[in-house]
Amino acid sequence: MGIRRFIAIATWHAPSPLRIEAVTVRELRELMREAENGAVVSVEPSWTWVA
């Protein structure tokens, strides 16, 4: 049995690429809005940032 994940990658200019991952579309939308407002916190120092 697999796991479904929804992923968004920001296209606006940022110091490093921004990647958001969620379990549901609703959660992904909320996280994308938070990212647009600058509320996303880096979990890893690499290019992947997850909210």
Image (cartoon, rainbow, N blue to C red):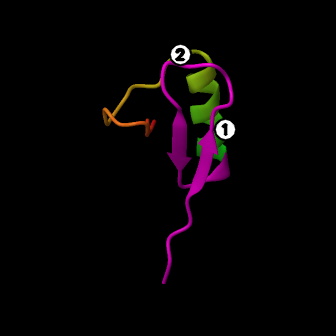
| Vertical arrangement, residue 3 with respect to residue 18, above or below | below
Q: For the residue marked with disc 2, what is the amino acid? A: Gly
Place of residue 4 in the rendered image (x, y in percent of width and height, measured from the top left): 56, 66
Q: Locate residue 48 relative to residue 21 in the image: left or right.
A: left
Magenta-drawn segment:
1-25
| Image mark for residue 40 | none
Residue at 52 percent across and 47 percent down: it is 21
Q: Which mark is residue 29?
A: 1
| Magenta: main secondary structure | loop
Looking at the rendering, in which quadrant would you find the C terminus? top left
Q: Which residue is mark 2?
A: 38
- Element type at marker 2? loop
Q: Earlier in the sequence, mark 2 or mark 1?
A: 1
Q: Amino acid type of disc 1?
A: Arg
Q: Which residue is at 64% across, 26% downward?
A: 33
Q: Residue 44 placed where, x, y %?
A: 31, 36
Q: CA distance from mark 2 to mark 1?
A: 14 Å
Q: Are marks 2 and 1 in contact (CB under 8 Å)?
A: no
